[in-house]
Image (tube, rainbow, N blue to C red):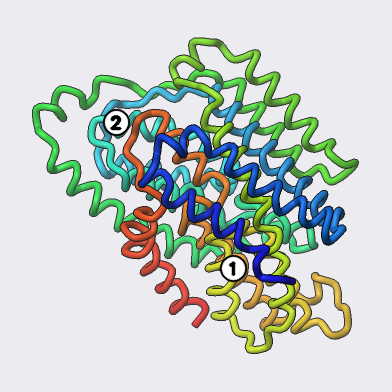
Amino acid sequence: MTYFLIVPFALLLLLIALAPLFFPDWWSKHYPKVSLALGVLVIAYYVLQLHSVEIVLHTASEYISFIVLIGALFIVSGGIHISTKDLTNPKENVLLLVVGAILANILGTTGASMLLIRPWIKMNKVRIQPYHIVFFIFIISNVGGSLTPIGDPPLFLGYLKGIPFWWITSRAFPIWLTAIGLLLIIFYILDLKNFNEQKKSVIKQIEGTDVWKIDGLINFLFLGIILLAVFIESPLFLREGVIIVTAVTSYFTTKKTIHTANHFTFHPIQEVAILFAGIFATMIPALELLRVQAQMMTSLTPSFFYWNTGLLSSFLDNAPTYLSFFSVAEGNINSTSLPISELLLNPTFSSYLTAISIGAVFFGANTYIGNGPNFMVKSIADHYKVPTPSFIRYITHYTIPFLLPVLIVIWLLFFY
């Protein structure tokens, strides 16, 4: 495969990273044309030149499943209004992040993120800073969802390949607890400093003026239906049909006062749908190259799988990245075509698979495009006029100084 096919993907990532900084007005008007044009360019080459229609259709199917699920969760969660205090202290913020990390394994990282991002913004609105959004993404949109197959798409794909539902829970829990604990400590230090710097008059005026209240409880039923629908495997697109019907029903049965209170519009999901259409299309060659290179890899250790799965999951879709390295691990161990249930009894394969799972989920927090809900959270925050770091600043000011040390500690303790 020629390497020039990766150029559109690299160009799209570069524009997502730099265009909002250097020509924001142009980008805000023309990003749909740019994203879709680059995507069409790659698809046209695969169909007309390589005659690889099957891979294009497979990618289109994955994109439809992705955007239907994330869009439905966005719509249904937009029908739930959680009234909160207008100012919370660092301990209360830590408590909500813990609850969100747990919910990420029940509702999925996307469901938990969409449910909690609006109340999170409201409860910190007086003193909200970019780190509030970033640590929300770190903990709730990514790391938190590493305990069950529901938590994150890579783990769900592993479940579909035959990995028992609770297998990852028993192996990931010490890792999850360590990572969440370290991130919460870092967040608490940052938040305590911010809290103490606020004017006492503002804190006194606002603290305690609101009570916790939840409206739109019927939408929790719709969330449950969507989560159950995820497990539908056939016939083709029945799952997506059930999810769409559920989302439409939720939207039209939700009181307008709830949508108004949530400042609900379709702009955030529209932006995500357009950009990820381009990302899914342009990353086809990158994923193909990864699959080819992965089969040639020989020096295999848990460290190898942790770092390589993780680093590629930071910029590529972490679900197919997970599957690629899953195949490498399986091929390295399984010379006699053993079923997955027997392979899991092999401690070497189990250590490989744990490293692949954690790498795919944890490293998805490294960038806005590392995991689906990341960009959605940013879009909602931008819609609320909340300050969020740019693509580059996210990496340089938050991923490298705060998340990377945690990832290194996890590696040293569990995979080195």
Residue 28 in view in this figure: yes
Q: Amino acid at mark 1?
A: Arg
Residue at (62% x, 77% y) in the render: 351
Q: Mark 2 sits on what residue?
A: 125
Q: Which mark is residue 171?
A: 1
Instruction: Determine which of the numbered discs, if any, sits on residue 400 in the image.
Output: none
Upstream in sequence: badge 2 or badge 1 = 2
The image position of residue 225, as x and y in percent, is 71, 32
Q: Residue at horizontal 61%, vertical 33%?
A: 73
* Residue in the image at 70% along x and 79% along y: 349
- Side (left or right) of 112 relative to 298: left
Looking at the rendering, which quadrant does residue 199 occupy? top left
Looking at the picture, tell me which residue is in the foreground, 270 or 181: 270
Within 10 Å of disc 2 (Cα), the crowding (few <14, some 14-19, many 20+) is: some
- Distance, label 2 to label 1, CA atoms, is 38 Å
**Which quarter of the figure has residue 9?**
bottom right
Label 1 residue SS: helix
Q: Nearer the viewer, residue 354 or 390?
A: 390
